[in-house]
Image (spheres, rainbow, N blue to C red):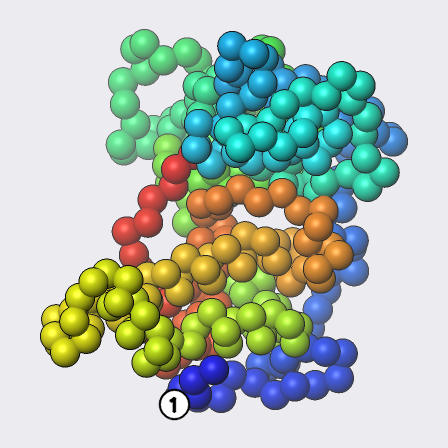
């Protein structure tokens, strides 16, 4: 791997982590732990499965289709991981005798998938706060049936979706719960005009991510971010452009930098969560990856600005948009 100039990224310390600064860790909970408000045992999962089964697109054979849309892809993956389907190139195929696995997928990932799927299917509609300057005229909009609470704004949710949202502990007595707030960050409703990147919980999570980098994660970041001369030559060859052209080389470097940012985003999607920090490989196996997760996408530049200060292309704002 190529060596880069710039500030050192940290020192290896005991516990197989890379330390940057000294941050107190205050999260002794299990990764992906369910809120205590959920139904005992596994009863909370059934309404979630029913929702996914009913709301994911199907083809003529009855299989679910992801249509190359991120929330549908995540929904299909959720049904597979919950034991209700098997993998198919275009989605998921129902199994004749579904059975829940011994170890369930992460609650927070399931909740985020249900929220984004409901929003994608227009059965969850976010509403502006009363009196908001940019709020549209209410004519034609169904009145909200979920009141603003715990940092979340008002919303309308179709009645058939309430069982899943309530079983996940997101709604109680017609209001958003405390647990719902950071789940809803992962759908980032524009109507609520929330900038969670300045929230102390997001900033603390950034500092913890910097202070507790596992060795394998540090090595992965080093591999992802090292752009070598050989990489440039291979990219130019792939694009059938001569390496003697300064313009072609500059474009190759820019494309490689963009690809590097994508790969680093994927690392945060798969191996990091707001409430738990870095996940071990075993812990990550419980995770469900939903691409274009706004929390992960915003943590990447926040983390990179301090961990990789010599690579500004990783923390300068880009034009990537949320798919769903």
Residue drawn at x 53%, y 16% is: 58
Q: Quadrant of residue 137?
A: top left
Q: Quadrant of residue 292?
A: top left
In-image side of 282 versus 127 (left or right)? right
Q: Secondary structure at mark 1?
A: loop
In-image side of 21 versus 116 (left or right)? right
Residue drawn at x 38%, y 28% is: 128
Residue 320 seen in this snapshot: yes
Residue 154 seen in this snapshot: no
To which residue does mark 1 refer?
5
Measured from the top left, where is residue 151 in percent x and y? 53, 40
In-image side of 134 versus 322 (left or right)? left
Q: Residues within 10 Å of mark 1 (few under 14, many from 20)?
A: few
Residue drawn at x 75%, y 56% is: 282
Residue drawn at x 44%, y 27% is: 67
Measured from the top left, where is residue 122 in percent x and y? 44, 19
Nearer-the-camera pick, 185 or 137: 185
Nearer-the-camera pick, 263 or 118: 263
| 190 up-or-down from 120: above or below | below
């Amino acid at each position: 791997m190529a060596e880069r100039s710039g500030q050192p990224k940290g020192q290896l310390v005991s516990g197989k982590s890379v330390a940057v600064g000294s941050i107190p860790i205050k999260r002794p909970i299990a990764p992906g732990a369910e809120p205590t408000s959920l139904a005992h045992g596994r009863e909370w999962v059934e309404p979630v499965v029913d929702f996914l089964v009913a709301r994911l697109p199907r083809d003529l054979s009855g299989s679910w289709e992801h249509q190359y849309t991120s929330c549908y892809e995540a929904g299909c993956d959720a049904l597979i991981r919950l034991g209700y389907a098997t993998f198919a190139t275009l989605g998921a195929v129902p199994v004749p005798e579904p059975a829940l696995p011994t170890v369930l997928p992460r609650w927070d990932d399931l909740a985020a998938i249900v929220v984004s799927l409901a929003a994608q299917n227009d059965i969850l509609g976010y509403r502006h706060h009363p009196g908001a300057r940019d709020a549209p005229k209410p004519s034609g909009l169904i009145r909200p049936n979920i009141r603003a609470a715990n940092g979340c704004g008002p919303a309308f949710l179709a009645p058939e979706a309430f069982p899943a949202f309530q079983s996940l502990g997101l709604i109680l007595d017609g209001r958003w719960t405390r647990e719902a707030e950071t789940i809803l960050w992962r759908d980032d409703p524009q109507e609520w005009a929330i900038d969670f990147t300045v929230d102390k919980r997001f900033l603390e999570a950034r500092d913890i991510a910097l202070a507790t980098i596992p060795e394998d994660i540090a090595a992965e970041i080093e591999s992802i971010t090292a752009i070598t001369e050989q990489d440039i030559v291979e990219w130019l060859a792939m694009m059938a452009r001569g390496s003697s052209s300064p313009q072609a080389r500059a474009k190759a470097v820019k494309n490689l930098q963009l690809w590097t940012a994508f790969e680093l985003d994927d690392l945060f999607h798969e191996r990091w969560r707001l409430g738990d920090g870095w996940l071990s490989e075993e812990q990550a196996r419980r995770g469900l990856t939903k691409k274009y997760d706004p929390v992960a996408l915003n943590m990447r530049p926040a983390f990179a600005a301090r961990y990789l200060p010599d690579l500004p292309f990783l923390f300068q704002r880009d034009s990537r948009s949320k798919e769903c």
